[in-house]
Image: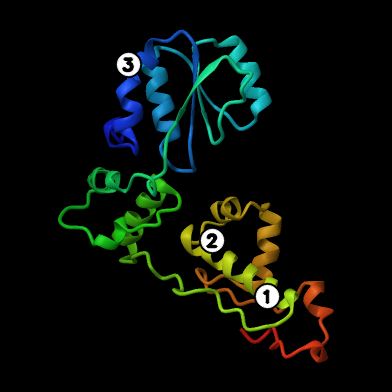
Amino acid sequence: MIALDLLPGRSQWGAHLEELLARPEALWVYGPMGAGVSLLATELAQRRQAPCLEATELEAAAIWLAGHPRGVVAARVPAPGHLPCLSLRLPSLDEHPEAIPGLLSALAEEEGLVGALPPVLGALPCPGNLRELRNRLLRWKLLGQLPGSEPHGPLAIEAEDLATNLHALERHLLHQALRRSYGNRVEAAQRLGVSRRQLYLLIRRHGDPVRGEAATGDLPRRVLKRRPEQNSSPDPLIR
C-alpha cells in the first residue's frame, strides 16, 4: 500500500491533515482519475473511525452524507456547495512531478522489481497518475515495453474540408487514448468521454493500434457526403 506521504501535493494538504481529521464535518476527497483519491479517502476514514463511500452519483452521495455526518467520500469532482462537508483536492502528478520518483520506487518494491528503472517510466505527461505508473511498471516487468510509442509531432492536417479533418482528429484521439490505456478499452472510453458502444464503433472505423486490429473502412456520413470535386482534400481512406 502506498504511503500517504508519497501522494502528490502532500506538502500542501498534509500540513493540515490532523486538523482535518479532528473536524466534525464530513470530508470530500476528490481529484483526477488514478491520483490516489480512494487510497487517501480510505485512510482518512480509518483514522476517523468513520465509514467511506466511493461516490459515483452526487445525489446518492448527498443522501449518504445525511446519514453519516463524519463520513469520508471519494469522488472525481468537487463537492456541491450545499453539502455540509470539507473538500480536499488531491492534485495530479503533472502538477507535482517531484512525487513521481518516490511513487515509482514504492510501486516497484510492491511488484518485486529491483535495480535502476528506465527514466522514461517517470516521464510526463502521466495521464492516469498512479494507475499509469503501475501500468508502466507492469508492462516493463512482464513485456519489456516502455511508454513513448505514441506518434510525436503535431497532428497532420492535409485536407481542406472540415469533414475530413474531423475524421483525422477522431482517429488521432482514439489511438492516443488506446495507447495511453495500454489497450484497456474501458479506460480508453473514460478518457474519451464516450460509452463502450461508441468506443467500439470508433475502433471499427479507425482500428486499434495496440491490439493490431485494422479499420473496416466504415466512414461517417459527413465524410461520405464529401464530393471529391469540392477541393483538393485527399481520400480519407488513405491514412
Measure the C-alpha gap from mark 1 to mark 3: 53 Å
Name the residue at 38% across, 45% down: 95
Q: Residues within 10 Å of mark 2 (few under 14, many from 20)?
A: many
- CA–CA distance in space, label 2 to label 1: 18 Å
> Residue 143 sits in which quadrant?
bottom left
Q: CA distance from mark 2 to mark 3?
A: 39 Å
Q: Is residue 93 left or right of residue 5?
A: right
Q: Is residue 218 visible?
A: no
Rendered position, 131 above or below 6 = below
Q: Which mark is residue 177?
A: 2
Residue 179 visible from this viewpoint: yes
Q: Which image quarter: residue 206?
A: bottom right
Q: Earlier in the sequence, mark 2 or mark 3?
A: 3
Amino acid on which disc 2 is placed: Ala
The quarter of the rendered structure image containing the C terminus is bottom right
Residue that numbered label 1 is attached to: 165
Crowd band around label 3 with a 10 angstrom C-alpha radius: few (<14), some (14–19), many (20+)? few
Residue at 45% from the left image edge and 53% from the top image edge? 127
Q: Position of residue 76 (x, y in %)?
A: 54, 36
In this view, 183 is above or below 35 = below
Q: Earlier in the sequence, mark 2 or mark 1?
A: 1
In the picture, measured across the screen, residue 4 lies left or right of residue 28, that is: left
Position of residue 29 measured from the top left corner of the image (x, y, whole percent): 47, 28
Residue in the foreground of this view, choosing between 84 and 50 = 84
Q: Which residue shows up at 54% across the image and 61% down it?
A: 177
| Left or right: 56, with 48 as reference point | right
Which numbered tag is attached to residue 18?
3
The quadrant in which residue 35 appears is top left
Q: Amino acid at mark 3?
A: Glu
Quarter holding the N terminus is top left
The number of discs equals 3
Identified by mark 1, the residue type is Asn
